[in-house]
Amino acid sequence: MSKPLIFVTNDDGITAPGIRALIEMMNQLGDVVVVAPDRVHSGKGHAVTIHQPLHLDPITIDDGPQKEFKTNGMPVDAVKLGLAHAVDRKPDLLVSGLNHGVNNSVNVLYSGTMGAAIEGAIEGIPSIGFSLDNYDWEAGLEAAKFYMKKIASQVLQNGLPEGIALNVNIPYLSLDEIKGIKIARQAMDKWNETYDKRTNPFGRDYYWLNGNFTYEDKGLDTDVYALKNGYVSIVPVQFDLTAHKVIDQLRDFEK
Amino acid sequence: MSKPLIFVTNDDGITAPGIRALIEMMNQLGDVVVVAPDRVHSGKGHAVTIHQPLHLDPITIDDGPQKEFKTNGMPVDAVKLGLAHAVDRKPDLLVSGLNHGVNNSVNVLYSGTMGAAIEGAIEGIPSIGFSLDNYDWEAGLEAAKFYMKKIASQVLQNGLPEGIALNVNIPYLSLDEIKGIKIARQAMDKWNETYDKRTNPFGRDYYWLNGNFTYEDKGLDTDVYALKNGYVSIVPVQFDLTAHKVIDQLRDFEK
């Protein structure tokens, strides 16, 4: 019997420690094809390259059994181009990450890690984005490795509901300290944007994004709450953005 | 009594005919501040600029009463930076577009026009993205102008449910031919990606995205169906991506 085919991507670039850890774990579960950006892409969300040509170059980074390609595209491009030209059949699982930094709450919208996973779900592939609540590339990844393998195994075995990707956030704690997994909803928080305004040597102003995250959602069933309390959070994410609940409230527009 | 403050942006760039038409209409409804990209951004979705400085430069393009700024950022950046530095109070309405090209169905995810509108909704501003089912910058915009003004007026008067942005798509028909407005859901279609593979003069392969849209959703309540039948479609869009319906199906992960 052939092993499951697992497609791996990320948004921190193909050499980031997070994706190397994810590849290591996925090699234990199936045949792995990696298609990932050749550089760091932060905040690219669901952006896609339309009017520029893309490259897809085979690359060998370590002595693992996986096949790997790097691309000059963004995370969603890596998925689209990789599914079209790097695999010979539809993958059984798509995993994205491990992101160096948390993607809970509204961050799911800005996240290229999750953009790639949502693209996988659109393509009908059970898909998971993994993020770690730590931005340091030197962070220890042992607990994350354990949970990535556990959750990916479970998805390979049982699948996912149609059109759903999982947004998995892992607290930066040791395996002993992590209390388990919580299925959660996306917390309805937001960034409080501030920009640091400076003037360049030629007298022109420029701005650096410099926001603070505001924790407004006090719910006990959110991804933010789960993480704060030492749990791995899993939010099932859909790509149907329709607010079905309010459709009937808006009928006046039809008049 | 002061007039409502209307924030205008787009993803085709500040000189595109679509945004000029939108500005013209909004000037009839309130005080207008425009913050828009200095170039075309296609497919940027909800991407945000994190590690690059941004500019916000006053600009005068026509003799209208609006205040205008161009930025080197993407559509979501234009909203974030503009709300922080181009307005002195929270706008009563945010409008994005008129996009030269349709943003129905799953295209909402890739659309910078809708990325900007969704960002407005996150900021608690009633927000609308407008798109025209025609990609030609020379396309006639009279019917679109009529519906943009009509829908924006109605939102200014009645507001929108919290956390909701409207995704408005306008068929490329004359005013007489358009049958009216339909509140709709996002059609669950997808792109069937193909990439045109070429080889450059140095022997290296490259790929151009070249997809076909596949109409798989046969529902009569979708935005795709409404447009095909001569209606302006309005989909209420939310930024909570949680698939609440499946949360209980996933409890096994907690074991």
Image (spheres, coloured by chain):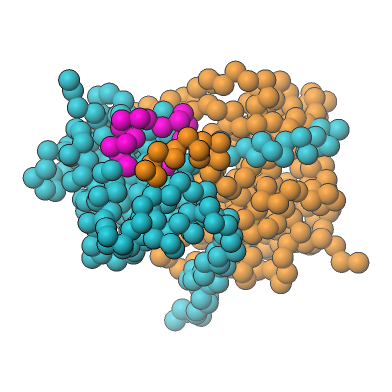
Chain colours: A cyan, B orange
Looking at the image, the residue that sits furthest to the top is B218
Looking at the image, the residue that sits furthest to the front is B255
State the image quarter where residue A139 is shown: bottom left
In the displayed structure, does residue A147 sit left or right of residue B236? left
Residue A7 visible in rendering:
no
Q: List x then y, in percent, for residue B108.
A: 57, 39
Quadrant for the N terminus of chain A in the image: top left
Read off the magenta span. A151-167
Determine the residue positioned at 75% across, 30% down.
Answer: B182
In the displayed structure, does residue B67 sit left or right of residue A211? right
Q: List x then y, in percent, for residue A251.
A: 80, 34
- Above or below, B231 against B151 in this view is above
Q: List x then y, in percent, for residue B154.
A: 83, 45
- Work out whether residue B20 or residue A75 is closer to the camera in this orientation and state it: A75
- Above or below, A88 against B234 in this view is above
State the image quarter where residue A5 is shown: top left
Residue A73 covered by magenta stretch: no
Determine the residue positioned at 37% across, 30% down.
Answer: A159
Q: List x then y, in percent, for residue A114.
A: 42, 46
Looking at the image, the residue that sits furthest to the right is B1
- Work out whether residue B62 or residue A87 is closer to the camera in this orientation and state it: A87
In the displayed structure, does residue B73 sit left or right of residue B34? left
In the displayed structure, does residue A37 sit left or right of residue B66? left
Residue B180 visible in rendering:
yes
Give the mark count.
0
Determine the residue positioned at 27% across, 23% down.
Answer: A89
- Work out whether residue A113 or residue B15 is closer to the camera in this orientation and state it: A113
Determine the residue positioned at 69% across, 68% down.
Answer: B87
- Above or below, A74 against B63 in this view is above
- Work out whether residue B253 or residue A94 is closer to the camera in this orientation and state it: B253
Quadrant for the C terminus of chain A in the image: top right
